[in-house]
Image (tube, rainbow, N blue to C red):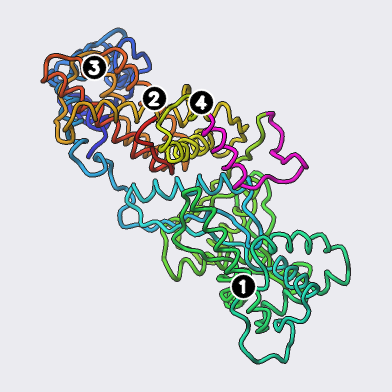
């Protein structure tokens, strides 16, 4: 269904045309003076120059052509503003259509299109740390938003599972267990089914090996192991598969705990087979050129304010780099899925890297001219003191530790305040903690750094996840006491607070479209914070269950029920859900 502002604008444009003026002057905006009106049109001021008459004359002529049934107030005020307030009947009709429409009437603007969201950024053999929080939950929210807006969405974790890190692990395992068959080049039997390490051991093996990179002998072994792995050495491939099986199972468990889910678990290794043909084609067509022994793709374009360095495709030693793999990954995605849009959610410090890759992809014809390639660069999460988040010993905090700390903090508040019965403490705690954690992050603009403040994020008041959840639970409680509410129709607003709530509800579709266009889940957070505040104001100023007029009561109930459904849909898009009690 159409957004309410589009409907009002269309009516205003028709009135301008009927009054003898160009329809383009009839654009309506949300009022910047809500104390005076709800919507306004300033077109008469601009039209006055073209038609050489007083703007108030034009405004009066247009107002005379508007349908009075749509508005509770229409006025032309000096020097030529048109101020509007919608009628209760207009709002009732609009919200009833929202209530009975799929997805509340939000237009499926992505219907028929495929969107790949590349997020997560996990590396195998390493535990997830706090640096993985933002790409995981921002990416999940954007994926869910695109799906809600009609896109066929594919979330790809794009694992770091190739390159020197694997050679380092192989070299370290060989030093510890040289007798294993993976290191015998003459071994022809079946390799063991069980990995020669646990996930905990694997997470200790990699940093140990990484610390030996300055040892020339060990470094040579690691580089040689990397080369032989990529060339297909049978034992190394089997050991690599063990690393993948053990590590990915642990990664899936941790992402599941965060309620983040990927449709594809592909990695750099899956892009590797596409590199030779891609590079050969780019060389043959002159897209890649030789520069100091390396093959590079010049990506500077006319109009650049700052020079963009060429993208290195193949280093002078013949090896590929991350940019090569990312380009080959686009080749794979275009061949397998033919996406219309690919989003990359990573640290904003990779902006230049992705700008180079995107330009190379377009220059080489890997993507279509209209394929959208977008890097959603995010800022960093710091501690409450504004300094980088570190453990007490100065290390990087594991993500599961952060989640556990937040959960423990919330559980203590739930128990202390006796929010729910003992048997409901754990389930309620988990939902509040996840809401606090995710909303605390997502309410910030993705590109901005922010400070992680557990006390503030877990507060039940203010712009927080628990406040949104409490609002939903409060409405659930009222609905539960009322009884059957699911099919009650929307009524005309019975007071100013009901109307204010109805106007807030109509902003749902515009908020989602703005969030989609800007790739900014924080705009959804801003919307539901406003909606929750309006709900609570309505609750405090209106007798709902105590209303003696059953018809009025039913209207109140249907209105808060619609608000609840929209709030629950919104937090689902953000990746969390509300408990039953709180």
- What number is the disc on residue 302? none
Quarter of the rendering containing residue 185: bottom right
Between the residue at mark 3 and the residue at mark 4, the CA separation in whole angstroms equals 47 Å
Looking at marks 3 and 4 on the same chain, the residue that comes earlier in the sequence is marked by 3
Which is more foreground, mark 4 or mark 2?
4
Which percent across, then down, holds residue 30? 33, 23
Give the answer, above or below, for where 356 lies relative to 17.
below
Between the residue at mark 3 and the residue at mark 2, the CA separation in whole angstroms equals 20 Å
Between the residue at mark 4 and the residue at mark 2, the CA separation in whole angstroms equals 29 Å
Between the residue at mark 1 and the residue at mark 4, the CA separation in whole angstroms equals 46 Å
Query: Can the viewer see residue 22?
Result: no
Query: What kind of element bears circle 3?
Result: strand
Mark 1 crowd level (few <14, some 14–19, many ≥20, 10 Å Cα): some
Instruction: Look at the numbered discs 3 and 2 and tell me whether their residues touch, using CB distance below 8 Å.
Output: no
Residue that mark 1 sits on: 242
Which percent across, then down, holds residue 329? 54, 66
Instruction: Look at the numbered discs 3 and 4 and tell me whether their residues touch, using CB distance below 8 Å.
Output: no
- What number is the disc on residue 530? 2
- What number is the disc on residue 85? 3
- What number is the disc on residue 416? 4
Give the answer, above or below, for where 537 lies relative to 474.
above
Looking at marks 4 and 2 on the same chain, the residue that comes earlier in the sequence is marked by 4
Between the residue at mark 2 and the residue at mark 1, the CA separation in whole angstroms equals 50 Å
**Extreme residue in the top direction:** 78
Q: Is residue 391 magenta?
A: yes
Mark 4 crowd level (few <14, some 14–19, many ≥20, 10 Å Cα): few
Quarter of the rendering containing residue 505: top left
Query: Can the viewer see residue 559?
Result: yes
Query: What kind of element bears circle 2?
Result: helix
Quarter of the rendering containing residue 406: top right
**Extreme residue in the right direction:** 216
């Amino acid at each position: 269904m159409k957004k309410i502002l589009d409907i009002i604008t269309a009516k205003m444009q028709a009135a301008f045309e009927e009054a003898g003026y160009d329809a383009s002057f009839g654009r309506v905006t949300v009022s910047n003076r809500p104390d005076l009106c709800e919507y306004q049109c300033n077109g008469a001021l601009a039209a006055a120059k073209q038609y050489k008459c007083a703007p108030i004359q034009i405004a009066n002529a247009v107002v005379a052509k508007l349908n009075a049934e749509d508005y509770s107030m229409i006025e032309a005020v000096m020097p030529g503003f048109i101020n509007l307030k919608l009628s209760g009947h207009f709002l009732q009709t609009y919200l009833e259509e929202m209530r009975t429409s799929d997805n509340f009437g939000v237009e499926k603007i992505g219907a028929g299109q495929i969107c790949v969201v590349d997020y997560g950024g996990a590396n195998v053999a390493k535990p997830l740390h706090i640096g993985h929080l933002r790409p995981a939950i921002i990416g999940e929210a954007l994926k869910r938003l695109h799906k809600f807006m009609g896109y066929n969405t594919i979330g790809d974790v794009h694992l770091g599972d190739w390159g020197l890190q694997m050679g380092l692990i192989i070299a370290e395992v060989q030093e510890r267990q040289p007798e294993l068959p993976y290191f015998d080049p003459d071994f022809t039997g079946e390799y063991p089914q069980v990995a020669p390490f646990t996930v905990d051991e694997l997470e200790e093996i990699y940093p140990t090996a990484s610390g030996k990179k300055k040892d020339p002998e060990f470094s040579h072994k690691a580089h040689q192991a990397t080369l032989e792995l990529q060339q297909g050495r049978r034992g190394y491939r089997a050991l690599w598969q063990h690393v993948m099986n053990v590590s990915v199972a642990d990664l899936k468990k941790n992402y599941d705990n965060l309620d983040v889910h990927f449709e594809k678990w592909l990695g750099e290794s899956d892009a590797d087979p596409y590199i030779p043909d891609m590079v050969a084609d780019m060389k043959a067509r002159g897209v890649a050129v030789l520069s100091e022994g390396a093959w590079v793709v010049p990506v500077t374009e006319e109009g650049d304010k700052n020079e963009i360095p060429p993208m290195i495709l193949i280093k002078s030693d013949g090896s590929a780099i991350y940019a090569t793999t990312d380009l080959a990954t686009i080749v794979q995605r275009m061949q397998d899925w033919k996406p219309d849009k690919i989003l990359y959610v990573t640290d904003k410090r990779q902006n230049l890297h992705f700008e180079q890759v995107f330009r190379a992809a377009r220059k080489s014809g890997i993507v279509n001219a209209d394929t959208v390639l977008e890097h959603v660069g995010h800022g960093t999460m710091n501690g409450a003191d504004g300094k980088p988040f570190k453990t007490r010993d100065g290390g990087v905090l594991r993500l599961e530790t952060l989640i556990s700390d937040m959960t423990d903090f919330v559980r203590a508040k739930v128990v202390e305040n006796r929010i729910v019965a003992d048997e409901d403490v754990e389930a309620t705690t988990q939902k509040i903690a996840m809401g606090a954690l995710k909303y605390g992050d997502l309410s910030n603009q993705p590109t901005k750094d922010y400070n992680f403040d557990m006390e503030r994020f877990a507060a039940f008041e203010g712009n927080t996840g628990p406040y949104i959840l409490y609002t939903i639970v409060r409405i659930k409680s009222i609905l539960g006491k009322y009884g059957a509410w699911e099919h009650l129709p929307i009524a005309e607003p019975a007071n100013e607070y009901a109307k204010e709530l109805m106007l807030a509800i109509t902003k749902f579709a515009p908020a989602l479209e703005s969030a989609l266009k800007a790739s900014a889940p924080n705009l959804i957070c801003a919307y539901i914070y406003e909606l929750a505040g309006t709900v609570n104001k309505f609750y405090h100023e209106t007798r709902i269950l105590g209303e003696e007029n059953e018809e009025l009561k039913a209207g109140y109930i249907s209105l808060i029920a619609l608000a609840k459904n929209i709030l629950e849909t919104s937090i689902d898009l953000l990746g969390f859900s509300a408990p039953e009690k709180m």
